[in-house]
Image (cartoon, coloured by chain):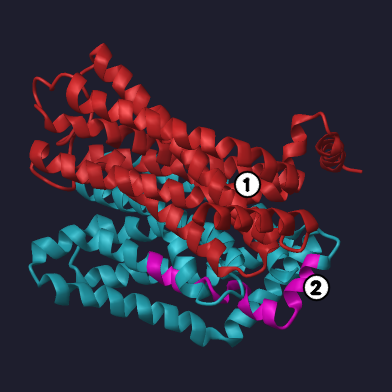
Chain colours: A red, B cyan
């Protein structure tokens, strides 16, 4: 038995034990746990976003150079962070899935992809809207912007690949391989784009902010970042839940869970 | 192990020779697309001279992309791929031979042809020498990354388009360093670092890509 097989066997034992945290790798347990977690993260996202947006618009002072327009930073920066973290999370779940053979890990990777692509798009869009008044252009071939655009293409490639494979097992694993290859390439892309840009155009546009931010601004930014995290977790888990139900549709528990959800919705209607 | 490597290499070389029309199609594509640009941007000699390295690199990259779908397609259809995956030797051995043969029969002709196309753009003399060198150093990385993409999309609907979507973003660093090496050489700037990065990237891809490729092929034949 190779080392990885031994490791897998040990992980499987842990997943079966009712006391270990690993049991949530089983679809049924995962479904139960995320059912509890999604509302918490969802409400946390709403509350944090309300507080964060209020602080961003009414509490944080205006920037002495950029005036009011800088306030887009409170959405732009968390969005850019999330888009990068989510890609790494996808690669992480891909590695977990490929090494431990856990189906839920692959489902998590699938569920994260649309949210990551959305954040990528938000970061690019808000960046363009911010760029026009401050630099006079919607787009510049700045290293960060170009890398962000390529990251968007990587997300779209992942989603397109996974969607066009009908066999779920192959879709899971092919997606995981692509996410891993992509995550190795993300730093290479960033480095190469930086090299290309600095050598040929000079730093005509620099995104580097003033070295120190006011505390109010920093706190607001952190609140918005936590809001973005909570939203992403809530949405990805909710999406993963329906994917789990769909995949496990042949099992008894999934049919019961689906029936319970339908009954609850009917009751709410009346 | 070496016997298998050589056997696959011989087989691939023979297949490439017998279906040499495929290679010619990719080369013709390279020539035609490279001649389209002056129609698009006009015939200002200075402009053409400036953009020539970039255009020839992008066009070569697209020609490589065009050859990728047939990398595993035939072997997958007639069952050879399955037999190869069942062999006792590690998959990267025969994959290495296959990819080497593919690179020699598709990318090397592009590199040889590139200086001739550069003539159309009336480039500086130094470009004729360095353009093929950068292509030879950079295209292994394109073929290797592309092979992982070809394996991932093997047998899917619209696999050619999907393949382009998957691998083109990953080709960007190769393009950047390849063009940058040529233009630096032209402008008299140092460019050894770019060549080293191209070669290093190709070596790293040689070490890593066959494993990813093998894993993806196993999924495709399951």
Res B196 visible: no
Residue at the image position 15 percent from the left and 65 percent from the top: B48
| Picture residue at 43% right of the left edge, 78% below the top | B26
B186 vs B216, left or right, is: left
Single out the residue that lies furthest toward the front.
A270
Q: Main secondary structure of the magenta part?
A: helix
- Asked if the magenta segment contains residue A59, the reply would be no
Q: Position of residue B219 (x, y in %)?
A: 70, 63
Disc 1 from disc 2: Cα separation: 28 Å
Residue B147 seen by the camera: yes
To which residue does mark 1 refer?
A94
Q: Chain of mark 1?
A: A
Q: Are marks 1 and 2 on the same chain?
A: no
Quadrant of res A83 = top left
Q: Say left or right for B53 vs A31.
A: left
The magenta segment is B61-85
Foreground of the two, B40 or A231:
A231
Secondary element type, mark 2? helix
Nearer to the camera, B28 or A167: A167
Residue B83, numbered label: 2
Residue A105 image label: none
- Tell me how many marks there are: 2
Residue B78 pos. (x, y %): 72, 83
Residue in view at x 62 percent, y 70 percent: A166
Instruction: Give coordinates of residue A31: x percent, y percent.
Output: 67, 45
**Left or right of B129 in this view: A268:** right
Q: Nearer the viewer, residue A177 or B116?
A: A177
Magenta stretch contains residue B79: yes
The residue carrying pointer 2 sits among few (fewer than 14), some (14 to 19) or many (20 or more) residues within 10 Å by Cα, namely few
Which residue: 73% across, 70% down?
Answer: B221
On-image quarter of the N terminus of chain A: top right
- Callout 1 secondary element: helix
């Amino acid at each position: 038995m190779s080392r990885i097989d031994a490791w897998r066997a040990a992980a499987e034992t842990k997943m079966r034990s009712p006391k270990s945290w690993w049991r949530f790798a089983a679809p049924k347990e995962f479904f139960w746990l995320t059912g509890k977690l999604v509302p918490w993260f969802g409400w946390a996202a709403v509350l944090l976003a309300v507080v964060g947006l209020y602080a961003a618009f009414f509490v944080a002072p205006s920037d002495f150079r950029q005036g009011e327009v800088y306030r887009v930073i409170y959405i732009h920066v968390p969005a850019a962070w999330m888009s990068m973290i989510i890609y790494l999370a996808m690669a992480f779940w891909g590695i977990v899935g490929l090494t431990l053979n856990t189906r839920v890990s692959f489902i998590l990777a699938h569920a994260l992809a649309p949210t990551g692509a959305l954040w990528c798009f938000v970061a690019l869009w808000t960046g363009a809207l911010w760029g026009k008044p401050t630099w006079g252009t919607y787009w510049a071939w700045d290293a960060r912007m170009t890398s962000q655009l390529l990251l968007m293409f990587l997300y779209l490639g992942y989603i397109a690949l996974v969607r066009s494979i009908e066999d779920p097992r192959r879709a899971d694993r092919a997606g995981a391989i692509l996410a891993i290859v992509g995550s190795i390439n993300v730093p290479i892309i960033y480095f190469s784009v930086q090299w290309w840009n600095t050598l040929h155009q000079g730093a005509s546009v620099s995104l580097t902010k003033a070295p120190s931010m006011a505390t109010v601004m920093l706190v607001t930014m952190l609140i918005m970042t936590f809001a973005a995290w909570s939203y992403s977790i809530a949405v990805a888990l909710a999406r993963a839940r329906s994917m789990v139900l769909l995949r496990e549709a042949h099992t008894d528990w999934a049919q019961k869970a689906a029936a319970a959800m339908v009954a609850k919705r009917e009751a709410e209607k009346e | 192990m070496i016997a298998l490597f050589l056997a696959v290499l011989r087989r691939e070389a023979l297949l490439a020779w017998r279906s040499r029309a495929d290679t010619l199609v990719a080369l013709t594509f390279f020539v035609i697309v490279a001649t389209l640009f002056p129609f698009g941007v006009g015939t200002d000699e200075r402009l053409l001279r400036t953009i020539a390295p970039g255009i020839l690199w992008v066009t070569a990259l697209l020609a490589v992309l065009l050859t990728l779908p047939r990398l595993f397609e035939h072997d997958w259809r007639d069952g050879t791929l399955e037999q190869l995956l069942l062999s006792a030797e590690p998959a990267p051995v025969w994959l290495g031979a296959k990819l080497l043969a593919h690179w020699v029969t598709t990318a090397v002709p592009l590199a040889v042809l590139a200086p001739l196309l550069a003539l159309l753009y009336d480039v500086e003399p130094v470009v004729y020498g360095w353009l093929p060198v950068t292509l030879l150093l950079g295209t292994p990385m394109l073929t290797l990354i592309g092979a992982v993409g070809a394996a991932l999309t093997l047998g899917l609907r619209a696999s050619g388009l999907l393949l382009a979507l998957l691998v083109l973003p990953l080709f960007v660093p190769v393009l950047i360093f390849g063009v940058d090496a040529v233009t630096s050489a032209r402008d008299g700037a140092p460019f050894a670092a770019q060549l080293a990065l191209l070669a290093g990237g190709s070596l790293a891809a040689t070490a890593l890509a066959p494993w990813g490729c093998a894993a993806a092929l196993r999924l495709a034949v399951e």
